[in-house]
Image (cartoon, coloured by chain):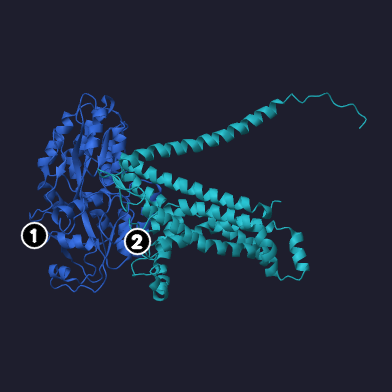
Amino acid sequence: MGMPEAAPRKNTVRLGDRVFSNLSKGSGIALLVIMAAIAVFLTIRAAVAISNNEGNFLTTFQWNANDSPPVFGIAVLLFGTVVSSVIAMTLAVPVAIGIALFISHYAPRRLAGPIGYVVDLLAAVPSIIYGLWGALFLVPHMTGLFDWLDQFFGWTGIFAYNGTPARSLMTVGILLAIMILPIITSVTREVFKQTPKAHEEAALALGATRWEVIRMTVLPFGRSGIISASMLGLGRALGETMAVATVLSPSFLINASLLESGGGTFAQNIASQFKEAGSMGRDALIASGLVLFILTLLVNGAARLIIARRKEYSGAS
Amino acid sequence: MKLGAAAALVTSALLLTAACGTDDNSGLPGAVDFSADHLECGPRGSLLASGSSAQANAMEVWVNTYQANCDDSQINYKATGSGAGIQEFLQGRTAFAGSDSVMSDEELAASRAVCADGGQAIHLPMAAGPIAIGYNLPGVEDLVLDAPTLARVFDSGITRWNDPAIAALNPGVTLPDLPITPFHRSDGSGTTDNLTQYLNGSAPQQWPYEPGKNWKGKGGQAADGSSGLVGMVQQNAGAISYFELSYAHQNNISTVRIDTGAPEPVAVSVENASSAIAAGEVVGEGGDLALELDYATREPGAYPIVLVTYEIICDKGNNPGTLDLTKAFLGYAAGDEGQGALAEIDYAPIPDRIIAQVRDRVAGMS
């Protein structure tokens, strides 16, 4: 207090500080440059392909980019990518939340650890292994379920099934659901664990049951976390390539029924068509990649908006 | 059976991950002898080539034999697929490209930029592979189909095995009342290109689609790579599909005999494929040896569904650094010994009349 103030040195920045600040600034800029470079590359090559396309890029139901004139469209790919991801999310998110709640609030300590570990282990399985498992195990075992769905819900048209090998968007969706389960589970679990103890105890003190505690404190608190986790999972589902290419029987048709084979996804189509593609074929595939890129950006942007609106619930506060 | 299907799927999936060709078979059948008696070696050096995976096995035998007999020569053929092979050749990165289909006019025009001295790319037919129609029909050992029926089966016009059209071609055979599941390639493929050329060439009414590397028929299911198709045929009773003969042999899959109008339906075999190529014609101009096959041939013992794979080089203006080695290697492959090695691995040699012209072109490369 009574000591004289230190000599003013506010304008001198130490070397280490300057280096560090420049390094981090450089990294930030490099990231933007890389993203911009990807976008520019995709746009230029896509423009070449689209300007030569004799079909409508958005509505044509075929992919003959190597023919002259080239005719190709992304309608089927967009439909397949969105539908298989929606199926995967519908199945995976509730299950993931259930597992996360079980691990964080219901399971005895001795069980919670191993279960969490096993779920995380699912994330370590390479997608090609999922593809093989899907093709050799899941597909033959889906026919029973599909027959059942056809028997009771076949009248909807969505669940009509004619008994051919079950290599459809529904099977892909189920496989993707299993693949994205671990990432959603582990993030939501961590978020649920952040719920302030005081809130939970307060609710308990008011006489709430365990379910009421979860409904009143854990779920509202974790909502933005659940959304972020789901978006991470959705990102994987949208871009999954090998597993889809191994399990799906692709075709450039949109089937009213989700159980019948056909359809395709952006990533699967790129993997399937790339090696025999000529220069126009490659540009066309890049154009479809640009659409996937934009789709992913849109989904992530939408997720950010939702999370931003729910900031008041954020567990980090 | 199950194990075979699993192995086929594993191979297909592994090849998929490597994003490389799926036409190549897993290993060569039996022990292959890499010795040669009259191999004229080129200068020492290394050669880079890439392209069709359908000729990967033939290349493997040729490359190994050449390297075993000529010290200090390195030949590296990457089976990246025909499309990628042509791209790399047109960028001047490889000495020659392998391809299952002939180049488009644009690609030919682009080749003038790579070939110096006013040269341009030419096709040299170097090996052929019969495409087998494999099926899985319990209790039916021998099945005969003709082009119109085959086209209708693959286009979902005929949907059950006991259809009258199939029964008419197979008198005395009890056909089961089973749905037909036709399988085709989901990836772009030279095999698809050649099969659809055959269907369109010999049954244009039943198969009105333009031939191409992508499947255009209706219905059916798709799988990735020849090995993927093999797996599907093994897994599903009632399935029918197409792949090169070696796949059918290695996996013990029954193959269809084709009724071409010849006195006897023709079985798929290396010899019968060579006979069909001999019925074809050279349609390339200016020294180009691109072939056009006669898909409607009624020649006895000519199996019409054939995939011809080419090496693509410049007639003039090849890279002088690799020219002599390229000539020596392709000269060996087109020679008696190179062609003679093919039949052992389920490829068909190119008939004498045409291979003689190939040898001339190789000798005349500059």
Which amino acid, by three-letter code, is at mark 1? Answer: Gly
Q: Which mark is residue B5?
A: 2
Q: Which of marks 2 and 1 precedes in the sequence?
A: 2
State the CA–CA distance, disc 1 to disc 2.
34 Å
* Chain with cyan colouring: A
**Left or right for B359, reference A198:** left
Residue B215 picture quarter: bottom left
Q: Give the total of numbered labels.
A: 2
Residue A1 picture quarter: top right
Q: Which residue is mark 1?
A: B261
Q: Secondary structure at mark 1?
A: loop
* Percent position of residue B125, x then y: 18, 41
Q: Secondary structure at mark 2?
A: helix
Q: Farthest residue toward the right?
A: A2
Given residues B210 and B261, the one toward you in this image is: B210
* Percent position of residue A128, x then y: 44, 54
**Left or right for A1, reference B234:** right
Q: Residue at x 57, y 57 (%)?
A: A184
* Percent position of residue A83, x then y: 44, 59
Given residues A270 and B123, the one toward you in this image is: A270
Chain bearing tag 2 is B
Colour used to depict chain B in the structure image: blue
